[in-house]
Image (cartoon, rainbow, N blue to C red):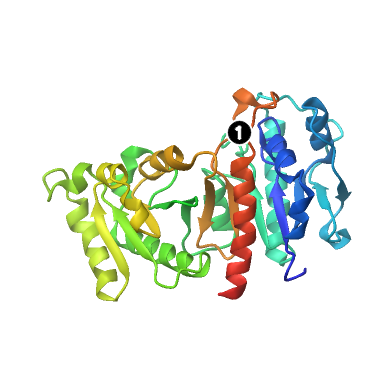
Amino acid sequence: MSATKPFIGITLGDYNGIGPEVILKALGSQRILKWCTPVIYGSKKVLEFTRKQLELPEWSIKEIKDLSEAGTDQSYVITCWDDSNTLVEPGKVTPEAGKAAFACLDRAAKDLDSGVLSAIVTAPINKHNIQSEDFKFPGHTEYLTERFEAKSSLMMLVSDELRVGVATGHLPLLEVSKELSKELIREKITTFLQSLREDFAIEKPKLAVLGLNPHAGEAGLLGQEELEIIQPVIDEFRSKGNLVFGPYPADGFFGKAQFKEFDGVLGMYHDQGLIPFKYIAFETGVNFTAGLPIIRTSPDHGTAYDIAGKNEADPSSFLHAFFLAIDLVKNRMNA
């Protein structure tokens, strides 16, 4: 692998969603080859079906069996399952598409593990039809955390304006308060600060922490989590010279655009962080799993079955995920 031109893997995701479409649209420009060599873990048959169905421009993509056959002058595809009888049905949820999505992810993870891939960009999966004996996780983040034996990971949403992480990820709202603890908040802040330093090359990162309850608990009137769990941990980090501030009431924090004063924002639960993020940067936002020994990014949207096969999918978020992966590879090499 060339240090200046890394192999970046792309997993196909659910082929009945918009994954194949955004991949083809995003990688159609040959200028991408200046910075990396894209390798799609998917199916040449599915990509060709999508290209013809949507009348997308044809471009050079070579099918290979493994990365030992790859050069650095074009894009590649590795077919990860027996696709001889594969039927692409845009907008439909099928068990076959779920099995194929896992096969692509598993093959890419093996190449990441062996070091031949520098990073992966994952197209959206359906969290239901991918479930199997091998995949019993709420999403990519949890699967990759266990697969690569990471002590801690952090779901982080990234744009030019904002970086948001969440202390609890794909968890029912009823369970959030039960999950929060000093240990968890400490772990997530540590992971966030380390990622800002190593992945984003910010020497002295400034982090905002949101409260859990309305008005950040209103001094205990609306909940005790801020006083008993969140504030003490913030004080710990501050006492060690870290620029960690809060807890802030989430509504006022985003309403006043205070996020512009920080390098990162840690929310307590999924929607608290993702709703304002997607409102601010839906088309350009990227999902990044911080804290892993490998680099994984993805667009911040789902399978979008409602527009699959209609040539309406916007590849902007996927492109941003792709270029962020390249940047993160460079930053980790220089860390």
Q: Is residue 164 left or right of residue 215?
A: right
Where 307 falls versus 247 (above or below)? above
Q: Is residue 57 left or right of residue 111?
A: right
Q: Disc 1 residue type?
A: Thr
Taking the image as shown, residue 189 lies to the left or right of residue 71, namely left
Residue at (75% x, 39% y) in the render = 24
Q: 10 Å neighbourhood of mark 1: few (<14), some, or many (≥20)?
A: many
Using the rendered image of the protein, determine whether residue 323 is visible from the camera's viewpoint: yes
Count of number-bearing discs: 1
Along the line of sight, the residue nearer the viewer: 312 or 234: 312
Q: Residue at x 55, y 38 (%)?
A: 301
Image point (45%, 39%), residue name:
278
- Examine the image and state in which quarter residue 335 appears: bottom right
Instruction: List the residue tagged with mark 1.
Output: 303
Image height of 118 relative to 247, above or below: below
Residue 294 in view in this figure: no
Residue 169 drawn at (x, y percent)? 43, 47
